[in-house]
Image (cartoon, rainbow, N blue to C red):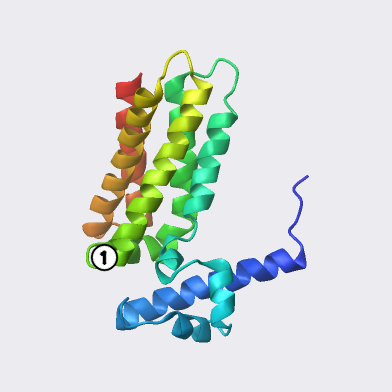
Amino acid sequence: MVERPGLRELKKRRTRQALIEAAVRLFEDRGYDDVTVAEIADAAEVSPRTFFLHFPAKEDVLLAGADVRVDLALQAIAGRRAGEGLPEVLVRAMEQMVADAGDRDLPSGLAALRARLAASVPALQARLLQRYLAAQAELARALQREFPDRLDAVAASALVGAMVGAVGASALTALQRGDGPDGVRDAMRRAVALVARSVA
């Protein structure tokens, strides 16, 4: 039986979602640099202090859900099934990330906005790179732990880098050519399949 979140947790989720939606709306209307944290908080009808309880900095509101996706992939790796090989585990981990992005960032327009802003906002570029590298390192360590006889640190990093890089690049290309959520999701899944074939 799935445990339902309590009222406090539901309120936190709603507040977080309201902040994300307010930020997306303001960034779309006025541009990233011309919007302050205080204005995002005001639009979501909360205090700036509440904003910072949910996000460390303004750019992090555009990265909402990234930690959840990494956790889903880590759970998929740690939950390796009996007889499941390296390609299958890697594909399942990436599929978890793709499915979550498809449920959250693509329909909301957050992924498209992030892709556009990342091309022109240095602070966002730096934060994206930082989060990207940290996530790759964490996933590579988890994969190596599951396959210690097959992977050393370099091989695990290379595989994760190839998979995450392929998925990210395909998503960006699909977003830039104006694909809708289903098209972007299909592009990411195609990238997963391409890399999985080379791993096999």
Q: Nearer the viewer, residue 18 or 109?
A: 18
Q: Which residue is mark 1?
A: 122
Q: Nearer the viewer, residue 131 or 164?
A: 131
**73 sits to left or right of 3:** left
> Residue shown at 26%/46% (left/top)?
169
Amino acid beneath label 1: Pro
Q: Is residue 41 above or below residue 198?
A: below
> Residue shown at 74%/48% (left/top)?
2
- Tag 1: Cα neighbours inside 10 Å, few (<14), some, or many (≥20)? few
Question: Quadrant of the image for the C terminus?
Answer: top left
> Residue shown at 51%/39% (left/top)?
73
Residue 75 at x, y percent in the picture: 58, 37
Residue 131 at x, y percent in the picture: 40, 51
Q: For residue 6, which quarter of the picture?
A: bottom right
Q: For residue 78, which quarter of the picture?
A: top right
Residue 162 at x, y percent in the picture: 30, 34
